[in-house]
Amino acid sequence: MEGCCNYNHYNFLTVFLILLAFTTAARPDSGETNTEFIRTSCKSTTYPNLCFSSLSSRSSAIGVSPQLLAHESLSVSLETAQSTSAMMIKVAHSQGMTPREVGAMQDCVEELSDTVNELRKSLGEMKQLRGRDFDMKMSDIQTWVSAALTNEDTCTEGFAGKAMNGKLKTVVRGKIVQVAHMTSNALALINTLHALHG
């Protein structure tokens, strides 16, 4: 009788371990699920590779939430705009620039300052995004992020033409274009979030 019970006990244990192994294998790792969610969501943006590379390191904070994804995308845009603005202020005070270059740099610093303010307001509103006034808050966010994008475009236009130093123009345009692309991606993810809510 004792041998019978031991046999059943081992049988039960074997079946239990097989089931446990199967369910663990069948359930994807949450980090992988989060990363896949970001990759799939980024396909709706204009610059999907940049979107994924700038957000994949934040997958644990994002989870599979469209709202957290839009929030983190705005955060990345804001951080990039702030660092670009700081770099532009340094460059604007460097020696050997023509008056036209100095003027373009100062305009750009001003535009970027406006961009930073608009992205900061958007992030603040994103944190309050719930309840009955969701659509109104979302409309404000879309307006501010669109304005930030316009500022960035205006900044790059200031560096058009042959009167600018080639190297300076390449560096500045490259940085501003990156900010603009990240902001464009953030706006696309915000628009997706709005559509999901509607």
Image (spheres, helix red, strand yellow):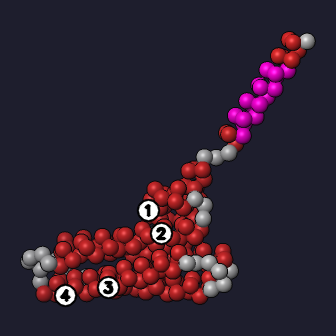
Q: Which mark is residue 54?
A: 1
- In magenta, the rendered stretch is 8-23
Say what secondary structure mark 1 lies in: helix
Above-or-below relation of 127 to 28:
below
Q: Position of residue 26 (x, y in %)?
A: 70, 42
Nearest to viewer (mark 2 / mark 4)? 2
Question: Which of the two labelled residues, at mark 2 and mark 1, occupies the earlier sequence position?
Answer: 1
Mark closest to the chain's N terminus, 2 or 4? 2
Which residue is tagged 4? Answer: 103
For this rendering, which residue is in front, 149 or 171? 149
Looking at the image, is 80 positioned above or below residue 19?
below
Nearer-N-terminus badge (1/4): 1
Is most of the magenta stretch helix, strand or loop?
helix
Q: Residue at x 22, y 82 (%)?
A: 105
Which mark is drawn over residue 73?
Answer: 2
Label 2 Cα crowd, 10 Å radius (few <14 / some 14-19 / many 20+): many
Residue 159: percent from left, percent from top: 25, 82
Q: Earlier in the sequence, mark 3 or mark 4?
A: 4
Residue 198 locus on image (x, y percent): 68, 80
